[in-house]
Image (spheres, rainbow, N blue to C red):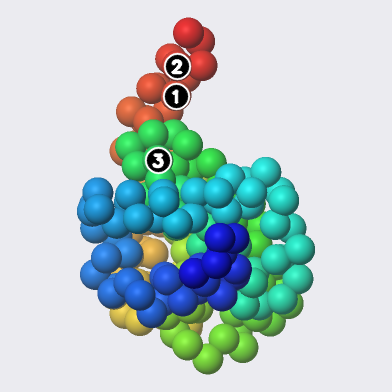
Amino acid sequence: MADHPSHQDVVNFWFHELRPAQWFRVNQKLDQQITNQFQGLVDQALDGRLINWSNKPPSALALVLLLDQFPRHLWRGHAKAFSGDTQALSLSLEGERQGWIQNEPEQVKRQFWLMPRLHSEQLDVHNHALTLFERWTDARTFALAKHYRQIIATHGRFPHRDDSREEYESRAQD
């Protein structure tokens, strides 16, 4: 991989170097690998310095991964893990408006285009997303989308994030 990873490096790493079982399990070795290889890109994405990646489907999907998935590995258990969620959601919505999600032939890539919607704490986002998850992902991912929507409908937020928020707020006050 080059000193400055490209959008293709991000996509290849996520979809080809990793196995699906690695995406959502706690794995400190993987978290460290993502930190070593991609933290610089994640920081650039969070700062808006990769906005040019949002113009075409392959690079926009890489940007979604950098903003939505990679922070969860870099800052697991901390509020910063969710710091790219708003930007990732905007990209996901734009991907739908542009037809990029609908035209993506690989189901697994459609799933990750949609993943920022699962991470949203807005009920209207979840309500709209259910139809998309049912149409464009597998039954297991659709079931997860229904479960997440129910959490938001019941609590108005993801309660498991409260500890991360409290820690972040207390550090900010120090």
Residue at the far bottom: name it.
Answer: 105
Residue linked to disc 1: 168
Q: CA distance from mark 2 to mark 1?
A: 5 Å
Q: Secondary structure at mark 3?
A: loop
- Left or right placement of residue 80 versus residue 97 in this view: left
Residue drawn at (66%, 77%), measured in percent from left and top? Answer: 57
- Name the residue nearer the viewer: 128 or 6: 6
Q: Are marks 2 and 1 in contact (CB under 8 Å)?
A: yes
Answer few, some or many: residues within 10 Å of disc 2's Cα (few below 14, many 20 plus, some between 14 and 19).
few
Q: Secondary structure at mark 1?
A: helix
Q: Which quadrant would residue 56 be assigned to in this image? A: bottom right
Q: Secondary structure at mark 2?
A: helix
Q: How many marks?
A: 3
Image coordinates of residue 124 in percent, x first then y, are 57, 55
Q: Amino acid at mark 1?
A: Tyr
Residue linked to disc 3: 75
Q: Is residue 32 visible?
A: yes
Residue drawn at (46%, 76%), measured in percent from left and top? Answer: 12
Image coordinates of residue 109 in percent, x first then y, are 48, 78
Residue drawn at (31%, 79%), measured in percent from left and top? Answer: 139
Answer few, some or many: residues within 10 Å of disc 1's Cα (few below 14, many 20 plus, some between 14 and 19).
some
Q: Which mark is residue 171?
A: 2
Residue at the far front: name it.
Answer: 3
Q: CA distance from mark 2 to mark 3?
A: 15 Å
Q: CA distance from mark 3 to mark 1?
A: 12 Å
Residue 42 position (above or below residue 23) = above
Residue 16 position (above or below residue 123) = below
